[in-house]
Amino acid sequence: MSYIQSLHHIIIRTKHSKNVLPNEHSEELYRYIAGYIKNKKSFLYRINGMPDHIHILVGIHSTISLADFVKELKTSANPWIKSSGKFPQFTSWGAKYGAFTIRYQEKDSVIEYIKNQREHHKTESFEEEYRRLIEENGIEIDEQYFLKD
């Protein structure tokens, strides 16, 4: 038996970072995404977000690649979002995403970070947050592609 723990803090933004995921309907979207994650035999630790992006802390099943997981999540959620009638301005997700591995010992602090998104974004914009998280994870930002769809 293999023993694998693969925790990822994933950030997915809307196309052009538009505010098209209203807070009043976000819980319905999160429930849909939670169902997707469960169907992929993965474990959702926390999901939350803002009208222009979402944060997900997930343990991805060992048989699924990160790239496939995110691609299929976005592909699966698109028709649901559009047909729900709750997100009329939503066109699609941004082409790129952020995903950062975390140690199991960091799980609780990342859960709290995701849980407090609305409070957090009173003092830091999405662009500032995204840039900070990328840099904190040792990734060099190529300005030519940063936040470009």
Image (cartoon, rainbow, N blue to C red):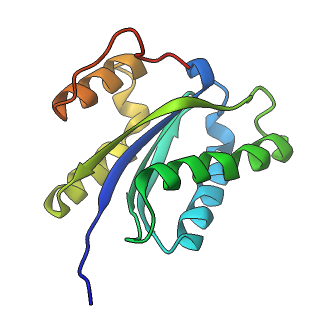
Is 10 situated above or below 145?
Answer: below
Task: Identify the residue at image location x=59%, y=56%.
Answer: 33
* In the foreground, 115 or 92: 92
Q: Quadrant of the N terminus?
A: bottom left
The x, y position of residue 83, in whole percent, is: 85, 45
Residue 81 seen from this side: yes
Task: Identify the residue at image location x=69%, y=53%.
Answer: 76
Q: How many marks?
A: 0
Is 11 situated above or below 120?
Answer: below
Q: In which quadrant of the rendered view does residue 119 lie? A: top left
Q: In which quadrant of the rendered view does residue 95 lie? A: top right
The x, y position of residue 92, in whole percent, is: 69, 32
Is 69 situated above or below 25?
Answer: below
Side of 88 relative to 104 (left or right): right
Is 39 situated above or below 134?
Answer: below
- Farthest residue toward the bottom? 1
The x, y position of residue 80, in whole percent, is: 77, 50
* In the foreground, 104 or 4: 4
Task: Identify the residue at image location x=49%, y=31%.
Answer: 96
* In the foreground, 139 or 42: 139
Task: Identify the residue at image location x=34%, y=30%.
Answer: 120
The x, y position of residue 93, in whole percent, is: 62, 33
Q: Quadrant of the C terminus?
A: top right
Side of 12 relative to 133 (left or right): right
Q: In which quadrant of the rendered view does residue 22 lie? A: top right
Residue 18 seen from this side: no
